[in-house]
Image (spheres, rainbow, N blue to C red):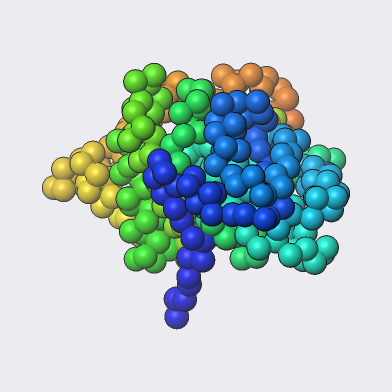
Amino acid sequence: MNQWTFPTQIYAGPDSLNRLTEFNNESILIICDPFLKDSPSLTYVMGLMDSKNKVTIYTDVVPDPPITHVVKGIEFMEGIKPTVIIAIGGGSCIDMSKGIAYFGRKLKHMDIKSFIAVPTTSGTGSEVTSFAVLTDSETQIKYPLVDDAVLPDEALLTPLFVKTSPPSVTAFSGMDVLVHALEAYVATAANNFTDALAQQAIELVFEYLPRCHKPTATEQDRMSMHEASCLAGLSFNKAGLGIVHAMAHQLGGQFHVPHGLANSMLLPYVIGFNCSRNQEVAKKYAHLSAKLGFASHKASDGDKLGALLEAIVKLQRTLECPMTLTEFGVDKATSEAKLNLMADRALEDMCYRFNPYPANHDDLVSLYKKVL
Ligand SMILES: NC(=O)c1ccc[n+]([C@@H]2O[C@H](COP(=O)([O-])OP(=O)(O)OC[C@H]3O[C@@H](n4cnc5c(N)ncnc54)[C@H](O)[C@@H]3O)[C@@H](O)[C@H]2O)c1
Ligand SMILES: [Zn+2]
């Protein structure tokens, strides 16, 4: 039996930040991405808050948030005793804040009435997922904290902050959306509901991500990508992901390849691999390819798949995504030396379990070799 709820209250649209005007007499902790420090956007947010609130801003956030940063954040929060936490930033900021809010509630028994996520990248979907990806800086391993209790209570989807996103952040986080949806679409826990969410996200990405990458991007383009990101998050939160993510987490942990870029590099090879090992997956992707208009409905499944892969590579090139680790700046000898370690760790990553085919160590090494 399938059973689920989507507990996060979602506000979407340019006016969604108005929700913040409803708080008064609260102790509000804003955990915000450092790119927003001293920005007019943050001043605007502060201006929305009733002056009867006590507002504190915390900006000690770094990409791929280490567990030690969560601990520091909890210590800081103990001095504030917030009743509301608002995380404004990319997936790293939201994940770190999820950790802080979660442990604040669970371990410190803090009365946090609302935890609100305001994503500034159209990428992770973290605003609606039960995951917080944290890094152990000593072992370089990314661990997902998985618990429905890390879900934000509310998500505000506004195009205001994504407008400033530089082309590379737009490209990499946008590719993350595509990978979430394409992996969720064939993951072991996928069903008609998660497929519907994934399909809509995929369609929106192919249409709006190239537009968002250009300086001419409109507010509507940005909003559509933001919604795609959220839809993909809702989908993979129930369907699961797969070995693109299991392997990409290691590239992030070892070489600090941005999460979406690591996924992007691996995506075409993993699709090819999964289709060659699982006929149902091949059929499903072929069907999707025709549905998206990449191939005729009358074409063979092989041609439909080829067309889907071509569309993905074309998108990667349009977005100027490095296709290999060498292109990203990691020399081949360094990455080769980590192949076995990364394959071992990818097998233990929780996303691995949802892949539609149980790839073994050698399969993963072969796939890594394609992106050296
Ligand atoms: N919790 C989940 O469900 C989930 C899902 C996928 C990925 N993740 C994790 O999320 C992290 C990646 O998040 P991300 O892709 O959003 O990137 P990010 O949060 O790491 O941000 C990347 C960089 O872009 C900057 N930035 C963010 N928004 C900006 C904007 N609007 N304008 C200018 N600069 C901006 C940040 O300061 C940072 O330097 C990884 O750690 C990944 O593992 C979590
Ligand atoms: Zn991802």
Q: Is residue 11 left or right of residue 360?
A: left
Residue found 57% across the figure and 60% down from its top: 153
Q: Quadrant of residue 44?
A: top right
Q: Is residue 83 left or right of residue 305?
A: right
The relative height of residue 12 versus residue 314 in the rendered view (above or below) is below
Q: Nearer the viewer, residue 195 or 17?
A: 17
Residue found 16% across the figure and 48% down from its top: 297
Can residue 67 be seen in this snapshot? no
Q: Nearer the viewer, residue 63 or 277?
A: 63
Residue positioned most to the left: 298
Which quadrant of the figure contains the N terminus? bottom left
Residue found 50% across the figure and 51% down from its top: 19
Residue positioned most to the bottom: 1
Can residue 122 be seen in this snapshot? yes
Q: Quadrant of residue 339?
A: top right
Could you say where residue 93 lies in the image, as x and y percent from the top left? 65, 41
The relative height of residue 164 versus residue 352 in the rendered view (above or below) is above
Residue found 55% across the figure and 42% down from its top: 48
Could you say where residue 8 lies in the image, as x and y percent from the top left? 52, 61
Which quadrant of the figure contains the C terminus? top right
The relative height of residue 59 versus residue 216 in the rendered view (above or below) is below
Q: Is residue 188 left or right of residue 27?
A: left
Could you say where residue 100 lies in the image, as x and y percent from the top left? 74, 52
